[in-house]
Amino acid sequence: SPRRFDVPTGGPSGATPAGALRALADSHHPAERALSGRRTAEVFALTVEPEAESHDHGHENPNSHLAPGEYEFTVNKIVRREVPPLGDDLAKDLGAESLEALRDRVRTDVEARLQAEMRSLQEDRLIEALLDKYPVPAPPTLADRQLREDLQTMAEEWARQGLDPAKSGVNWEEIARSRRAISERKVSAYYLLKSAAERNGLTAAEEDLTAY
């Protein structure tokens, strides 16, 4: 049977504000995407399909925020976020000396985040190419351990979002089946990189780990 959640969202009383519609529609969270255009006290259903296996072995599904199943949501209330004027006072409240300093800090943070994302994407593609060329079987016991860790991480993420996995009727067996290939790929990648490092005498110093 459908599980119920009360979902607070943003905007003036009555309907979701136009300024928030695009943010909701672009969200990776399926419940947030479904909130776009909803009104106070509105009830709506949401179906989350099991994660399909694809050619992208070992890649996390960015939309897997909810367990597969049928959900029923109620928009509990709608509130407007008051944004203070953009200026030096706001910048000081955020820990910067001035608005210009805040802009520089934000720009630096965004550039660093983009560089990290690009590096991560390049690393993922390199590992995928290496595993396709040099397959490394994942020992079943280690794949099982990795799968348990992945499921525990998922459960903790749901708990932070207000969903109690122990009481929500989550089908863990189905989730485990859909994610096993991802866990196996993680184990294979670990042994591939470990073997490459040992054969080439590669080690990581403390400063390398800090910089990474």
Image (cartoon, grey):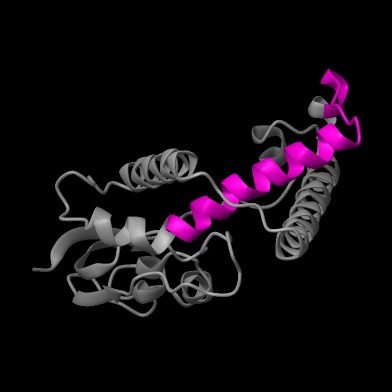
User: Which segment is the magenta one?
Assistant: 180-208
Instruction: Using the image as rendered, state which of residue 54 and residue 34 is in the foreground.
Output: 54
Indicate left or right for 211 with 190 as reference.
right
Residue at (47, 72) in percent of width and height = 53
Indicate left or right for 68 with 128 as reference.
left
Q: Can the viewer see residue 88 in this picture?
A: no
Residue 51 placement: quadrant: bottom left
Instruction: Using the image as rendered, state which of residue 190 and residue 17 is in the foreground.
Output: 190
| Above or below: residue 17 compared with residue 179 | below
Percent across and percent down for residue 35 are 35, 72
Identity of the residue furthest to the top in this view: 206
Please say whether residue 200 is one of the residues in the magenta stretch: yes
Residue at (43, 56) in percent of width and height = 180
Image quadrant containing the N terminus: bottom left
Q: Can the viewer see residue 177 in this picture?
A: yes
| Above or below: residue 9 compared with residue 184 | below
Residue 80 placement: quadrant: bottom left
